[in-house]
Image: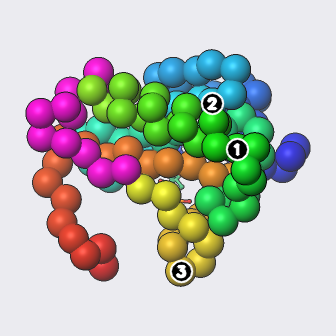
């Protein structure tokens, strides 16, 4: 999708602080971090949100989660943990319509969210 910001980041058309990349996913730091560690992991292919994944995306989603926890560890979050979040559509607070997993760490976060 030419107009999608995260597709453009995945294609390196928009600069980002990339932490990890392979054939199917990219991880980059959030431009407006809400914690000392805050990065996003996205599929390179455009998927609007988690409600629109298909059976054939199961391996892709596994790759996102696997690398999210690996990066969280390299960012120093192994001992105290982190929050792994998928916002979806309006009620979920999603503002960018390309599936992305947030990882936030190095700060105590509370539950439930506001
Ligand atoms: P959400 O509200 O779940 O859709 O999250 C979108 C996230 O994308 C927000 O945390 C933004 O700060 C982040 N974001 C928006 N534009 C960029 C960008 N150009 N590079 C990195 N992160 C971005
Ligand atoms: Zn996209």
Q: Are marks 1 and 3 in contact (CB under 8 Å)?
A: no
Indicate the quadrant containing the C terminus: top left, top right, bottom left or bottom right.
Answer: bottom left
**Does residue 7 appear to the left or right of 26 in the view shown?**
right
On whether residue 40 falls in the magenta region, the answer is no
| Label 3 neighbour load within 10 Å: few <14, some 14-19, many 20+ | few
**Residue beneath disc 3:** 91
Dividing the picture into quadrants, the one containing residue 72 is: top left
Task: Mark yes or no: residue 97 visible.
Answer: no
Single out the mark in the foreground, 2 or 1: 1
Mark toward the start of the polypeptide (1 vs 3)? 1
Image coordinates of residue 29 in percent, x first then y, are 45, 35
Label 2, on which residue?
25
Q: Which one is earlier in the sequence, the residue at label 2 or at label 3?
A: 2
User: Would you say 42 lies left or right of 30 here?
Assistant: right
Q: Position of residue 5 (x, y in %)?
A: 71, 46
Q: Which mark is residue 5?
A: none
For the record, the magenta segment spans 74-84
Picture quadrant of residue 109: bottom left
User: Circle 1 is placed at which residue position?
Assistant: 57
Q: CA distance from mark 1 to mark 3?
A: 24 Å
Q: Residue lying farthest front?
A: 55
Is residue 93 something one can see in this rendering?
yes
């Amino acid at each position: 999708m030419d107009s999608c910001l995260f597709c453009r980041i995945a294609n390196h058309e928009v600069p980002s602080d990339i932490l990890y990349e392979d054939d199917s996913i990219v991880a980059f730091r959030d431009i407006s971090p809400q914690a000392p560690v805050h990065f996003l992991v996205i599929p390179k292919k455009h998927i609007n949100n988690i409600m629109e994944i298909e059976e054939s995306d199961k391996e892709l989603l596994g790759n996102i989660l696997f690398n999210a926890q690996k990066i969280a560890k390299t960012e120093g979050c192994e001992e105290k943990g982190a929050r792994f979040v998928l916002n979806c559509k309006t009620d979920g607070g999603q503002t960018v319509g390309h599936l992305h997993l947030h990882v936030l760490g190095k700060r105590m976060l509370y539950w439930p969210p506001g």
